[in-house]
Image (cartoon, helix red, strand yellow):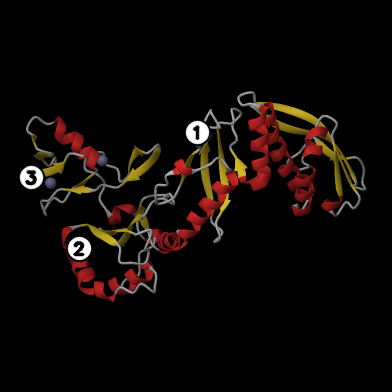
Amino acid sequence: MKDFPLISPCDYTLKHYVGFIQLFINNEEHEYPIEIKLDDPSNIKTATIYSEKLSNLLEDNKKIISQMLQNSSDLNTFLIDLKDLLEKKEILLSSKKYPLKYISKMIKEFDEIGWDKISNLKSDLHSLTLNINDSYNRNHKLDLIFPYNYNTEVIQIKADIPEKIDNKYFINELSKIVDFYKNIFDKYNNFWSQLEEIDKKTWVIEPLNPPRSSNYRRIIIEKKCSINIQVNPNNPRSFPIYQFMGSDDLVQKWTMILINKQHQWNINISIYENLKKILNIEFPQKEKMSLSDISDACGICYSHYLTIEKDDKLEKLLPDKQCKNVKCSQPYHYKCIFEWLRSLTTTKKSFNYLYGKCPYCEEMITLPIN
Ligand SMILES: [Zn+2]
Ligand SMILES: [Zn+2]
């Protein structure tokens, strides 16, 4: 069988399979003899599973397994689900970190929300990921970190959403967590739809691979000019906070257009449609231009994107500082020009600003110290 090379049919009737199922538990591989009998070889729902070594597990999960059989299209996909379930159960049952009472409570809760919603279950049972679908078919991941003292402390929850949730009111029941977050995910449907349309129909240069928590997009308008918009998660179709970036004359031109036509903003249509109508443009697509058409590379590191670490994640940033001398206009990454100015003895520091010379034209650059 495709994903189970150790399991094969006994004869040409395809009614009887024997072999071994391999379970990966706590970084070790275990092989269990298994036997599958089908009344009707073309109908997986008629299957019965036997395994002496796994008999307790199979018996305990009879209901879930029969549900899996109902939902599977063939033997291979059924065995994938079965393997996943047995592995998680074995991890839970072989754990010695928590008392048995706690483990059986956990098993009950997993039964309730569905084992297929759980992934990344670590052998110390200290963390796992919940996979939750919202009502609009988006899949979300919720990272849970369990306290070592289950009775008195709360579960820490990391969610990729545009707001901070205070979890301290949570009682430790997974089904309540699932319901609670499903509501929150649904609440942001319109916000995510707006951004998804922009991601699909325009060329977003920042952030690359945006997380769902991100509420801004930097979109290419034309050569040497982009617009950075910040969408209000609670009122996503309202007029966004914006800033044009690029060469001075273009920034001025587009800013004037948007200011003069701001009153035409229509909250009944999407942000993308509004921008398209008001700016009266077709947004450039990525395939039609290269990055160097859009913005110059940083004058210090010579790259477009600088990778930085922010909140445990890697982010790629375009140059966001520019020399104010119109004849120079050299762009720099903030971090690059900051390090450069700080290393020069001629640079002056006053209050929260650095005053130093542009490495290209020697004009004065003023840089806030973040
Ligand atoms: Zn740089
Ligand atoms: Zn300069």
Front label number (1 vs 3) = 1
What residue is at 48 percent from the left and 55 percent from the top?
184
Label 1 belongs to which residue? 153
Label 3 belongs to which residue? 363
Compute the Cα span from label 1 to label 2: 55 Å
Residue 165 image point, x, y percent: 42, 47
Which quadrant holds residue 219? bottom left
Residue type, label 2? Leu
What residue is at 40 percent from the left and 62 percent from the top?
198
Residue 241 image point, x, y percent: 27, 60
Vertical placement of residue 98 versus 330, above or below: above
Question: What quarter of the picture does the C terminus occupy?
Answer: top left
Q: Is mark 3 within 8 Å of ligand 2?
A: yes
Label 2 belongs to which residue? 250
Residue type, label 1? Glu
Neighbourhood count class around disc 1 (C-alpha, 10 Å): few under 14, some 14–19, many 20 upward: some
Vertical placement of residue 112 versus 29, above or below: below
- Precedes in sequence: disc 1 or disc 3: 1
Which quadrant holds residue 10? top right
